[in-house]
Image (cartoon, rainbow, N blue to C red):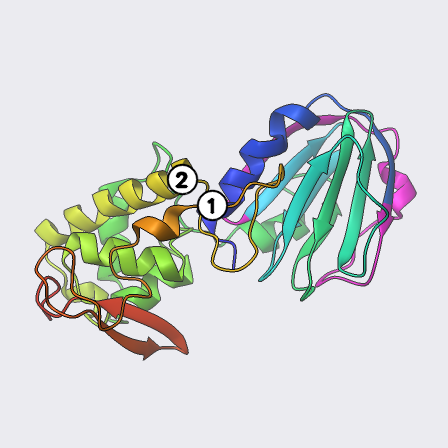
Amino acid sequence: MPELPEVEVTRRSFAEGIAGATVLSAALGKPLRWPLGCAPSHLAGQRVVAVRRRGKYLLLDLSGGLLLVHLGMSGSLRFAHHLPAPGGHDHFDLVTSQGVLRLHDPRRFGAVVFTTGEQSPLAQKLLGGLGMEPLSDGFSFDAFRQGLRATRAPIKQVLLAGKVVVGVGNIYASEVLFLAGIRPTVPAASIGDARLRRLHTAIREVLALAVERGGTTLKDFSSADGNPGHFQLEARVYGREGVPCLACGTPIRGLKQGQRSSYFCPRCQRA
């Protein structure tokens, strides 16, 4: 599932190329998670002002509104001057004067939604409940601590929920908790300030490194220019059950939390 690093890598790979382009046409394939919200012809003639990101949503600012794009569980974008005819898993084409932006999504949990702007009821419904952006200056330690103190749910589950901080997906949650020395099952409210500060720092470090490495490609993720990610080559605990810890040599353990796999070192991450 594409998470914040993959979405940010995708944004960076086409934002500059599409900025300033005029939409020539738009075409829909099979239905996605939500309807487009307008006739595809309504997008024609609009100018792409900029491409931003909020959590796992890409925000294409248009001269006459806002296009929200979510990659779902298996989606990816491709941007090129020329693309072949859409295949069975290609569900949205935005044809512009500077290239074609295409959403490829085999499982169709992704979405492309048009709305009047970021303050519209629809945009607020999708974006309003998102937590802090971890790579922004607004990722305050005090607000982070306050959010975690309010729940005794396991810290891994709190990070995945995205209500306190966005973008710490399953792979990255295991990695940041290892770096902070926190076991994934520990209640969020019970973590002391010293380890919370390490966690706050680790979230920034791991996500920034993941963006630098082009995201994580376990199956088929690639950026809009077709490049895979390489962060998986640097994972310290994720997917390494039974393999010696890189820090202490203790075998990495795995467990299930909310039907998701968690990985930790029982020595480096004491309960």
Residue 5 colored in magenta in the image: no
Residue 79 on image: x %, y % = 70, 36
Q: Residue furthest right?
A: 41
Residue 23 on image: x %, y % = 83, 31
The total number of labels drawn is 2
Residue 89 on image: x %, y % = 75, 60
State the image quarter where residue 40 is shown. Answer: top right
- The residue pinned by badge 1 equals 229
Residue 184 on image: x %, y % = 24, 68
State the image quarter where residue 213 is shown. Answer: top left
Residue 44 colored in magenta in the image: yes
The residue under label 1 is which amino acid type? Answer: Gly
Q: Are marks 1 and 2 in contact (CB under 8 Å)?
A: yes
The residue under label 2 is which amino acid type? Answer: Arg
Residue at 27%, 74% in the rendered image? 254
Specify the segment rendered in magenta. 27-56
